[in-house]
Amino acid sequence: MPSAADAATLEEYRLPSSGVRRCAVIYLLALIGLVTVAVLMWKAFGPNTRPVLSTRVQGPDDDPDFLWKVDRETRRKKSGEPDAGPADPAG
């Protein structure tokens, strides 16, 4: 059985009290909260927030307006209508 002196010495080496543990848990939760907020802010306002514009050149065979105009010209030629071409005001 430990003596009174041994018991006094053991008191110095005890684990931290519950108040210190509570404080550590609060700091840990605050750190997790800050990291979460930082990640959300990075995703919202980070460098890749703007959508990437397509730099691919669209060929004429992919353009619906072009295909419609070609189809219209083909139908005109088949039906025998004169080509209306651009009007030249200069003569």
Image (tube, helix red, strand yellow):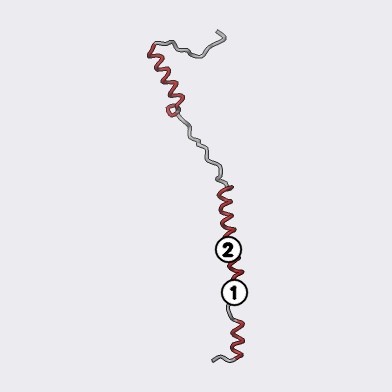
Contact between marks 1 and 2 (CB within 8 A): the answer is no
What is the quadrant of the N terminus in the image? Answer: bottom right
Q: Position of residue 66 (x, y in %)?
A: 45, 24
Badge 2: residue crowd in 10 Å (few <14, some 14–19, many ≥20): few
Badge 1: residue crowd in 10 Å (few <14, some 14–19, many ≥20): few
Q: Residue at x 37, y 14 (%)?
A: 78
Q: Position of residue 36 (x, y in %)?
A: 56, 56
- Identify the residue under disc 1: 18
Vertical position of residue 64 compared to residue 30: above or below: above
Residue furthest toward the top?
Answer: 91
Q: Residue at x 57, y 51 (%)?
A: 42
Q: Secondary structure at mark 1?
A: helix
Q: Secondary structure at mark 2?
A: helix
Vertical position of residue 47 compared to residue 87: above or below: below
Q: Position of residue 24 (x, y in %)?
A: 60, 69
- Identify the residue under disc 2: 29
